[in-house]
Image (spheres, coloured by chain):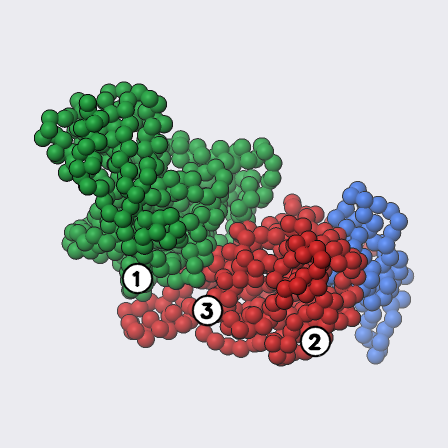
């Protein structure tokens, strides 16, 4: 059910992958995501930091800003595969 | 072993000074990168390099200070070149930190110190042998180096080639400790044809790229080396590191790393040390000297023999590692060892340490600015023979 | 739903990193990791042969960059990365040499080597991560610390004036100068791409948050608060006069590409000169690769 623009330009969606074990909870990704896809979680990783979680999965537009700004190499985005509905 | 590249070998008989001979020796040894800084009395070597390098091939750069010179040298070696620099006392002091880096990264290179009198600015144009302990202990931490002491322009040439060979064999900086007189003395220099010069090639790694470990020792105790840009994607650091070259900051690794740096040289001391002994058999007194002082001592030894004293000479071609075993051996057979040096008594301490009280050790210091009066050395020999 | 047979996705950055050493030692909210990410993205976009890149770094937090990237990398002594890189480039001129250095390492102890490498227009890329202090040793004042900032060796405030690094680089002769903050991730990447392709001394300064020392000692919050300050106070002015690029404490940060010109590099000048002097007898150095 992907939105289409100008007839056939498809909305790109991204799948966010978070490597919780290396995250240090700096919140750059949460702050600068243009669609507010991420929020800081309440859980702890084994170093005691709060990693982010994906709050609005379908809002991710594959801009990859979180991947570019993360200082820990802990988050990256792949193109979400189209799901047959 | 490979033969020298004829392009860098100035075959023939020449009348040159020690400084020029150092440069010619380096070019004959395949050195194609020189980063230096002018300092009396070593500047002539840099000038010779600057003039010759464009015709031989290679790169000369005058850096902004001695610290930059030695840092650039290490970089040049890791880029794949044989590299050399030359300096004197004040520049030598500046280089100390990065000499430690070269030792830690196990970087082969040659550094010549044309010694002048210190401390500090001292006597910039006059001879001394005052950096002999500094070459050994100058940088912080525990490490070992090799140091040679030529006594003539011919030896400046020959020893530079030896120095490059030793540095490539043991992956360690090798120092040529000349002095202002040998550096500025003009004498006959015979440069052999290139086919007669044997060079040790760098210990290049030739195995699979993904299995390369920069600091894993080979059977001979020395790790293989690569150069940057050949696809090995290695890392090296001045921090205490493991076999992968990655920092590993604990006491266990320190023991392994520092132990290796020490054993590399001390364990091979017998192969490295080179001495010139004359009339040692049956001698009562041995004159132990190095560099220009050994030539001055010749007169004193001649006069002592005329006076009936049985004198032998031991000339240190290799000053570090110090030949403690040989000196200890001698101390059991002779009455005394006389050590003239143009400093306040530096190598004599090593002699005393090796002798351990078994025979008399007499220091004949000279604080620099000129060579000894042979009469002073003769006086010491006569005193020692009593 | 189609069954997923593909293995778990891997961060594309991992190919460029020494993953056996991740997580790295930098603090939470430190921008150095972001700059490394921007750098790697630039290398990836330019499709540079990874075997040709050599990274040289000094000592300090930024100095640790060499240990985390999967290129031929050298972690050298404090302030001497520029001199080492000069030698490395001249030893193997085919390489692209990139120097990662902190503000204190590059312009404090390394100041002399910086200005001379720039003067010679050595063909290398220098990425200066400027966090306004000597962070690794606990947050001492640095030549770039803004006046009135409090650091551990200026506990009542810094009374010394600070360098403006683009001005220093231009005065020394750098031929490509750009300044960004860690927040300008895509622009840093673009500048790095341009710098890597630029023949000559390329200098990219990236103002980076230091939460544990600079921000804490000056009560500025954490890394995110510094990023917000960059957002609020950075102004992009390409081609701006570098004489006017000083940064006051929590003041305006003028970013952009300030200088981009062509001048012969050290090796170009050397080869041109010797070819002119010796003619055919001279074989240009670093041109016919071995």
Q: Secondary structure at mark 2?
A: strand
Q: Are marks 1 and 2 in contact (CB under 8 Å)?
A: no
Q: Which mark is residue C236?
A: 2
Label 3 marks a residue whose chain is C
- Whether residue B170 can be seen here: no
Label 2 marks a residue whose chain is C
Q: Secondary structure at mark 1?
A: helix
Chain A on-screen colour? blue
Residues marked 3 and 1, same chain = no
Q: Residue at x 50, y 36 (%)?
A: B258
Measured as percent of width and height from the top left, residue C9 is found at 74, 53
| Quarter assignment of residue A6 | bottom right
Of all chains in the rendering, the one displayed in red is: C
Chain B on-screen colour? green
Q: Residue beneath label 3, please?
A: C120
Q: Residue at x 26, y 58 (%)?
A: B7
Q: Are marks 2 and 3 in contact (CB under 8 Å)?
A: no
| Viewer-nearest residue: C46 or B186 | B186
Give the answer, above or below, for where C288 lies relative to B94.
Answer: below
- Whether residue C235 can be seen here: yes
How far apart marks 3 and 1 lie (CA) works out to: 20 Å
Give the answer, above or below, for where B209 lies relative to C151.
Answer: above
Residue C105 vs residue B97: left or right? right
Give the answer, above or below, for where C143 lies relative to C252.
Answer: above
Label 1 marks a residue whose chain is B
Which quadrant is the C terminus of chain B positioned in?
A: top left
Measured as percent of width and height from the top left, residue C268 is found at 42, 71
Q: Residue beneath label 1, please?
A: B47
Residue A41 vs residue C286: left or right? right
Give the answer, above or below, for where B3 lies relative to C149.
Answer: above
Q: Are marks 3 and 1 in contact (CB under 8 Å)?
A: no
How far apart marks 1 and 2 lie (CA) works out to: 48 Å
């Amino acid at each position: 059910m992907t939105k289409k623009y100008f007839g056939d330009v498809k909305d790109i969606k991204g799948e966010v992958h978070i490597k919780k074990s290396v995250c240090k909870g700096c919140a750059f990704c949460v702050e600068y995501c243009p669609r507010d896809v991420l929020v800081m979680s309440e859980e702890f990783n084994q170093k005691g930091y709060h990693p982010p979680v994906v709050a609005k999965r379908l809002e991710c537009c594959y801009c990859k800003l979180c991947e570019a700004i993360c200082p820990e190499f802990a988050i990256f985005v792949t193109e979400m595969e189209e799901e047959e509905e | 072993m490979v033969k020298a590249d004829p392009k860098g070998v100035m075959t023939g008989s020449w009348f040159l000074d020690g400084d020029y001979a150092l440069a010619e020796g380096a070019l004959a040894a395949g050195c194609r990168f020189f980063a230096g800084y002018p300092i009396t009395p070593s500047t002539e070597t840099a000038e010779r390099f600057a003039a010759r390098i464009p015709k031989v091939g290679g790169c000369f750069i005058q850096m902004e200070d001695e610290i930059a010179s030695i840092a650039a040298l290490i970089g040049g070696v890791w880029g794949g070149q044989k590299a050399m620099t030359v300096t004197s006392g004040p520049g030598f002091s500046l280089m100390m930190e990065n000499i430690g880096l070269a030792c830690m990264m196990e970087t082969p290179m040659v550094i010549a110190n044309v010694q002048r009198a210190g401390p500090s600015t001292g006597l910039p144009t006059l001879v001394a042998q005052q950096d002999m302990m500094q070459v050994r202990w100058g940088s912080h931490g525990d490490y070992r180096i090799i140091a040679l002491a030529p006594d003539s322009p011919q030896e400046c040439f020959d020893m530079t080639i030896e120095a490059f060979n030793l540095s490539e064999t043991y992956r360690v900086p090798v120092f040529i400790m000349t002095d202002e007189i040998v550096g500025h003395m003009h004498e006959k220099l015979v440069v052999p044809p290139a086919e007669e010069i044997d060079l040790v090639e760098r210990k290049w790694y030739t195995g699979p790229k993904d299995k390369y470990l920069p600091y894993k020792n080979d059977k001979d105790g020395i790790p293989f080396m690569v150069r940057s840009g050949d696809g090995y994607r290695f890392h090296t650091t001045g921090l205490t590191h493991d076999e992968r070259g990655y920092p590993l900051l604990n006491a266990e690794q320190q023991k392994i790393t520092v132990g290796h740096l020490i054993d590399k040289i001390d364990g091979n001391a017998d192969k490295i040390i080179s001495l010139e002994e004359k009339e040692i058999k049956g001698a009562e007194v041995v004159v132990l000297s190095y560099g220009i002082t050994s030539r001055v001592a010749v007169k004193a030894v001649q006069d002592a023999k005329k006076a009936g004293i049985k004198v032998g000479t031991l000339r240190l071609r290799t000053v570090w590692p110090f030949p403690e075993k040989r000196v200890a051996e001698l101390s059991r057979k002779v009455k005394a060892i006389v050590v003239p040096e143009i400093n306040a008594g530096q190598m004599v301490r090593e002699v005393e340490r090796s002798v351990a009280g078994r025979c008399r050790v007499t220091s004949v210091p000279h604080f620099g600015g000129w060579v000894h009066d042979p009469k002073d050395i003769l006086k010491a020999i006569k005193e020692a023979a009593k | 739903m189609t069954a997923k047979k593909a293995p778990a996705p891997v961060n594309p950055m991992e190919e460029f990193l020494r993953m056996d050493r991740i997580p790295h030692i930098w603090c939470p909210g430190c921008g150095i990791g972001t700059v490394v990410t921007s750098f790697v993205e630039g290398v990836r976009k330019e499709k540079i042969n990874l075997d040709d890149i050599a990274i040289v770094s000094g000592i300090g937090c930024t100095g640790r960059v060499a240990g985390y990237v999967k290129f031929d990398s050298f972690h050298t002594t404090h302030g001497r990365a520029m001199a080492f890189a000069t030698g490395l480039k001249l030893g193997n001129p085919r390489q692209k040499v990139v120097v990662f250095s902190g503000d204190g390492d590059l312009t404090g102890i390394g100041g002399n080597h910086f200005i001379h490498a720039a003067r010679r227009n050595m063909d290398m890329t220098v990425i200066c991560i400027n966090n306004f202090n000597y962070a690794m040793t606990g947050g001492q004042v640095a030549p770039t610390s803004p006046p009135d900032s409090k650091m551990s060796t200026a506990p009542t405030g810094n009374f010394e004036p600070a360098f403006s690094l683009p001005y220093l680089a231009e005065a020394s002769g750098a031929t490509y100068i750009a300044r960004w903050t860690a927040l300008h991730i895509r622009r840093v990447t673009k500048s790095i791409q341009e710098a890597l392709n630029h023949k000559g001394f390329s200098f990219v300064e990236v103002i980076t948050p230091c939460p544990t020392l600079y921000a804490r000692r000056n009560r500025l919050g954490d890394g995110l608060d510094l990023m917000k300050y960059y957002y609020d106070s950075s102004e992009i002015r390409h081609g701006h006069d570098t004489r006017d690029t000083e940064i006051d404490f929590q003041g305006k940060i003028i970013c952009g590409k300030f200088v981009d010109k062509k001048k012969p590099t050290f090796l170009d000048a050397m080869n041109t000169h010797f070819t002119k002097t010796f003619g055919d007898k001279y074989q240009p150095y670093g041109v016919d690769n071995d």
